[in-house]
Structure formats: C-alpha cells, structure tokens
C-alpha cells in the first residue's frame, strides 16, 4: 500500500469535523417517530429556511430523499421527464420504476443542462391515452455525471416555468446544490424559487457523516413523510446524526470554494499531459472527468495505475475516470496527483 493516499473517488468520503463530533455528543434527542427529537426538528427548520421552502424532512440518504419525492409527487403508471444521465435515472437502483412505478422520458442535455425547447419536444399530449401521463420533471444541480455541471437560476427558471405551465411538478436533485450556489456566488434560494421540491445532502462535500433533507410545501412534506415510513426511513434518536447536519449547513458551505479551486487546478494540470483529456463543465465545481483514450488505456488500467501510487478515482468505462475534490484534498495533494500522473504517462511512453 502506498504511504500517501489521495482519495478522489467522491466527496462522500469526507469525515465529520471536530465541531460535528462535539455537536453529536451533546445533541438533545428524542424519538423522532413521536415527533420528539428537537435536533431533527432544528435541522429540518434550518434546511427549509435555507431552501426557501415551508418544510423539510430528514432522511438517511439522497436516494431515499429522491424516492420519497417521487412517491409524494406521482402515482404508479405516470412518467417523469429527466436528463438522460441523471443520478435518479442511472444510479438509484431503478427506484423510479421498481418503487414508484414510473416510466422515464429522458432528455439529452449539454453538460447535463437542457433547454425549454428540448423539454417541449419531450412532453407528450396529455389527452392521448396511448401515453403515460407526465407529472414530474426532475433536474439535477450540480449534475454529477456531467462533471459537476451547474444549472444557473435562469436555466432552472426557464424549464421549470415551462414544465409547470404544462401541469408537471418540478423536483430538484440538489445533492450538491451548495456547490452550485458557491460556484455562481448566489443564494441557494435562487435555484429553488421555481421548484416544488428539492433534496440536498449534508453527507457529501459538507462533511456530515449521514443524511439528506427533502424540502417543499407543508402538504408535500406530509406526503413525503408517509413515503419515508413506507421505505423504512423513519428514525428514532436521529438527533445524534442531525446535529452534524446542522454544523454542515452552518459552517461548511463557504469552504466549498476551496474544493472548486483544487478541482480546477487538477483539471488544468491533467489536461496538459499529452494523451490525457480532462474536462469540467462550463461553470466548474468539484468534479472532473479524465479520459485516457489518447494513451490507449482503459478506465480500468488508469484507475489501477493510479491506485498503485495512492491516487483513488472512480472508473467511467470505457476510457475515463471521475475525480472529486473535497475537504481532505489539499493543494499539495493536487500537486502530488499531477506529478505521479506525469511520471506514469512518461514511463508508458518510454
Ligand atoms: C446527484 C446525486 N443525487 C443523489 C445521490 C444519492 O445520494 P446517497 O448516496 O446519499 O443515496 C448522489 C450520490 O452520489 C448524487 O451524486
């Protein structure tokens, strides 16, 4: 095992801060199924306020938050419109189908973002009984599979207004919505103003150990509450973990800018190595995609070679890998990654 590990697989590997551990230790708790956990309540109120929504629900994972949103917004047999490579359609175990009973109408975005015209083209006639009723649009901000791409508030508004005009509810998978907000220097509420619901994670770049928040109207959250129960996500003295979520929201948002700066420098440095293509989205955040087709390597070969020198990434076959910066990645780790990658490529060439 190499001495130095630079773990760029995901921002989910971040560990709780000392302040989080202290808050978890001291958190007042109660049975949240009886509505008696003051720390969970405080986290839900804070989350709702930060998203400009009436209410919020604490759930164990982003996947559960998204699934609760599907169950609360739709009925089995209906259809969700969503970007082709969205997490909810590709990486959540097919929950939209096997738990919510939905079909999906995918739209191919550019850097994960699509236009109102593309949305219009994907909408089916509601009168025609040959089609499933389309009742939900899901947006992802930042878009994980599109190298952490940001939807701007104006882009969100344009498609959300069009979708709502056709009777669809609009949900945002905002697992990394604070990365989008920090990248653009805007308040997260600029994205959520035109939405019916948003899910965000405290367990990713914000460093909390567990948890996500689903936010929306009081009536929507009442439905989502039932859905969380159905999925087995109702928790008891959950204040122990909610306490870390409060610290995450209050203390960990602004520092995401450091992750963005490190990702940008890593991307620029890798892109200068002959044979490597490294890219981020037009508004970059903490994710980059690295392609080694130019070296004749597979994704597997790249990730294995990196691992041998302590750099960890996620393979994206056939020839790419995803790298994610976070609180445990320093500027020196970026330098190290660039240095060992240059050496790897030179060795291969010589
Ligand atoms: C965009 C996006 N949505 C949802 C999720 C799901 O979150 P969790 O792993 O907590 O279920 C992830 C996780 O990586 C994600 O990147």
Image (cartoon, helix red, strand yellow):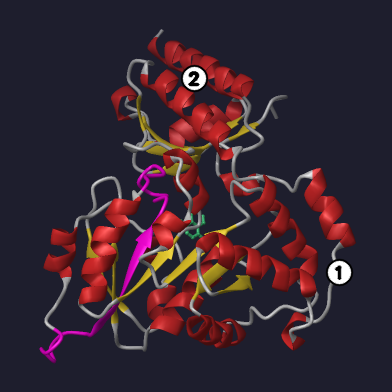
- The overriding secondary structure of the stretch rendered in magenta is loop
- Quadrant containing the N terminus is top right
Which tag is nearer the camera, tag 2 or tag 1?
1
Question: Residue visible at 62% across and 56% down?
Answer: 202
Q: Decide if residue 28 is on the left or right side of residue 343.
A: right
The location of residue 6, given as percent across then percent down, is 62, 30
Camera sees residue 254: yes
On whether residue 198 falls in the magenta region, the answer is: no
Q: Which residue is mark 2?
A: 341
Q: Which residues are magenta?
A: 126-150
Place of residue 112 in the rendered image (x, y in percent of width and height, measured from the top left): 30, 50
Quarter where residue 228 is shown: bottom right
Q: Provide residue 98's location: percent of width, then percent of height.
A: 42, 80
Residue at image coords 34%, 38%? 281
Say which residue appears at 54% left-offset and 70% top-offset: 214
Label 1, ligand 1: CB separation under 8 Å: no
Give the CA separation, mark 2 to mark 1.
48 Å
């Amino acid at each position: 095992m190499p001495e130095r590990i630079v773990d760029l697989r995901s921002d989910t590997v971040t560990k709780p801060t000392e302040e989080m551990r202290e808050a978890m230790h001291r958190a007042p708790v109660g049975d949240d199924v009886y509505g008696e956990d003051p720390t969970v309540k405080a986290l839900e109120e804070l989350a709702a306020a930060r998203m400009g929504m009436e209410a919020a629900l604490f759930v164990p994972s982003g996947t559960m938050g998204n699934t609760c949103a599907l169950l609360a917004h739709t009925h089995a047999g209906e259809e969700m419109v969503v970007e082709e490579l969205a997490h909810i359609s590709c990486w959540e175990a097919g929950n939209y189908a096997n738990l919510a009973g939905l079909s999906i109408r995918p739209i191919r975005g550019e850097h994960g973002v699509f236009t109102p015209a593309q949305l219009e083209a994907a909408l089916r006639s509601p009168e025609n009984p040959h089609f499933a009723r389309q009742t939900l649009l899901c947006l992802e901000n930042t878009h994980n599979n599109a190298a952490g791409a940001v939807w701007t508030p104006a882009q969100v508004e344009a498609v959300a207004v069009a979708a709502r005009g056709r009777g669809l509810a609009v949900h945002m998978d905002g697992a990394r919505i604070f990365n989008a907000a920090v990248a653009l220097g805007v308040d997260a509420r600029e994205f959520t103003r035109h939405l019916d619901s948003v899910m965000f994670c405290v367990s990713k770049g914000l460093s909390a150990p567990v948890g996500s928040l689903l936010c929306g109207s009081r009536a929507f959250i009442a439905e989502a509450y039932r859905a969380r129960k159905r999925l087995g996500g109702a928790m008891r003295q959950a204040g122990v973990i909610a306490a870390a979520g409060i610290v995450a929201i209050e203390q960990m948002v602004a520092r995401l800018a450091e992750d963005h700066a490190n990702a940008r420098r890593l991307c620029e440095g890798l892109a200068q190595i002959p044979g490597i293509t490294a890219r981020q989205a037009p508004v970059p955040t903490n994710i980059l995609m690295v392609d080694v087709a130019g070296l004749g390597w597979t994704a597997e070969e790249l990730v294995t070679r990196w691992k041998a020198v302590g750099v960890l990434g996620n393979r994206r076959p056939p020839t790419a890998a995803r790298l994610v910066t976070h609180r445990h990645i320093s500027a020196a780790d970026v330098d190290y990654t660039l240095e060992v990658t240059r050496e790897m490529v030179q060795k291969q060439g010589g």
